[in-house]
Amino acid sequence: MRRSFSNSAMAAVLAAALLSSCSSAPDTSSWKRAGDRIMTEWGENLDPSDVGGEYPRPQLFRPGHDNWRSLNGLWNYAVTEKDAPEPSSYDGQILVPFALESALSGVGKRLTPEDALWYETTFSVPRSWKKKRVRLNFEAVDYSAEVFVNGSRVGSHTGGYTHFSFDVTPYLKGKGEQTLVVKVLDATDDNTQPRGKQVSNPGGIWYTSVSGIWQTVWLEPVAEASIQSYVPVAEIGRSSLTFDVDVAGAKSGDTVEVKVREGAVGFNPENSVSGGLLAMSSSPVGKKLVVTLNGPDVKLWSPDNPYLYSVEILLKRGNKTLDRVEGYAAMREVGILTDADGHKRISLNGESLFQLGPLDQGWWPDGLYTAPTDEALRLDVEKTKDLGYNMIRKHIKVEPQRWYYYCDAEGILVWQDMPSITDSRFNKWATRDYTSGTDWDAPRKERDTYYKEWGEIIDQLKFHPSIVVWVPFNEAWAQFETEKAVAFTKEKDPTRLVNPSSGGNFVEGLGDILDNHHYPNPAMYLWNPDLVNVLGEYGGIGLPLEGHLWQADRNWGYVQYKNGEEVLAEYEKFADELIGLIKDGCAAAVYTQTTDVEIEVNGLMTYDRKVVKMDQSKLRDVNRRIISAQK
């Protein structure tokens, strides 16, 4: 049964009500979309006075109608030389949280490595927050951000894919409007920072650069001692969940209490939907808690039944509750099984499951890295499930936390890539043996940057039960000291599988997965009986559809056809070949790709998401046939 998301509309209403109670409505009459590229229907109908009004962190929600405030909307912006001071006047307005280069930002300009991008806005603090600490949260800023409140520097952050926050309480004025300024630098593709598929001069498989704020900016009130995050790990054999709860500001003797309740139809942690209490446990702060579920009917999470338990966590000092958050957890385990023919298979909850899904770039014609609305963000996940897939490979990008929540709730398995620092220019890429490929002799700074940012990505995402595979490298792009990077990934999260080097430059026997790429038809160059053998990319069947193209000419796919019937026929042909590989031991496959992206026309959907290129019912039947081919 699909979970209902209708309650999120109520969260948006509450957010809108809070905004209206804190400040007057901004004047958005001057805003207009930049450029003349194609748009999604959400981008065409976007209301600049109501952007990103959904709570950005569904897995950890503090109940109450005044528990957060979105700062999204029109801010002042300016572009200066990168070493220049804050400008005395600004160039115009930009719509946050859309990147400078995007149409929906209202600007549509490229930031060069020699530039600095400045933002300015004001905010007020609700009176009800008077006895709380005020945290300023940035969900993602690409790439380097320096933050000032009321003229004082409060901190900085580097890394375009992770969230960060500051306690701004000491910098606030006693009353009235507060001034927030953010300075951003972004070198994009100078080979020093993780940037995925962004380049200064887009073309082919490389896309328009993304600079500045590209996810929600928001405020929240927290107690002096507060719950920062938590990670639940299931052990199905013991019907238990082990919680690792991170707390700030605690004192000796403080305790953490965890309650697990039945989930509910339409489960949504934003609105405190939960059923009867199943189990609870408490322990001193800093120690992990084990919660054993009562009763024989423990509900496991899977694509067929993505059951989420409701979770309540309390931080206590004696009998006093200092902080309380709500969220969710799932009973699911990932592993490896050997089938009757000796093939290694990926297991979910102790049973083998063939994983089939699209390569998902996560790009939008109007918002670039940022979906125009939360409904649009959710659509890609829902449509993937509707088309019969059970997995998504999130390719060289990290999504907002709400995207992973939708994967959790829909029952979509996720392979999460690390966004690469550069392409394979510093490597020799080998796909058919273990000896021809070479690692990049990366400078120490770039190595440190990789580990810092990949570690932060894993730490911030490992909460989500949907994620089952980590992918530290793709096709030798900036691949270096592979064995160390895989060990680092395993140490960060030993509960999931590691796909060391998707598509080439393999190290024999390393990690859990050997991942071949082959275009356009499915094929495997290498097999390793000691690893899970998968086809990490294939397909790329192209169909350019007039009226839905990023540009009029020079569009490409790995192969191109004239209509949806031809595309489906080729997809079915590839499915028969893939089923043959499954019988030989292939345990998962990734089809390229979810949508067209810029000049690439090999998506299941057009870039504007207005057309699914194949008959959806027939495509779903083909995909179900592929998944069921693994016995």
Image (tube, rainbow, N blue to C red):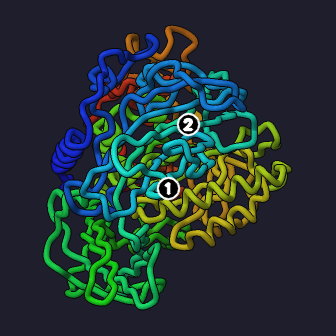
Quadrant placement of the C terminus:
bottom left
Image coords of residue 126 (percent x, y): 27, 51
In the rendered image, the vertical position of residue 346 relative to residue 56, given as above or below: below
Image coords of residue 204 (percent x, y): 62, 24
Extreme residue in the front direction: 174
Residue at position x 43%, y 30% from top? Answer: 75
How far apart marks 2 and 1 lie (CA) works out to: 49 Å
Q: In front here: 253 or 197?
A: 253
In the rendered image, the vertical position of residue 248 relative to residue 62, given as above or below: below
- Report which quarter residue 113 is drawn in: top right
Q: Amino acid at mark 2?
A: Asn
Q: Mark 1, residues whose alpha carbon is within 10 Å: few (<14), some, or many (≥20)?
A: some
Res 166 label: 1
Q: Amino acid at mark 1?
A: Phe
Q: In front here: 118 or 287?
A: 118
Q: Is residue 281 left or right of residue 368?
A: left
Q: Is residue 543 left or right of residue 63?
A: right
Residue at position x 35%, y 55% from top? Answer: 220
Residue at position x 63%, y 21% from top? Answer: 203
- Report which quarter residue 328 is drawn in: bottom left
Quadrant placement of the N terminus:
bottom left
Q: How many marks?
A: 2
Q: Which residue is mark 2?
A: 521
> Closer to us: mark 2 or mark 1?
1
Determine the secondary structure under disc 2.
loop
Q: In front here: 590 or 292?
A: 292
Determine the secondary structure under disc 1.
strand
Q: In front here: 406 or 526?
A: 406
Residue at position x 48%, y 57% from top? Answer: 170
Res 106 label: none
Q: Is residue 379 left or right of residue 509?
A: left
Image coords of residue 528 (percent x, y): 67, 62
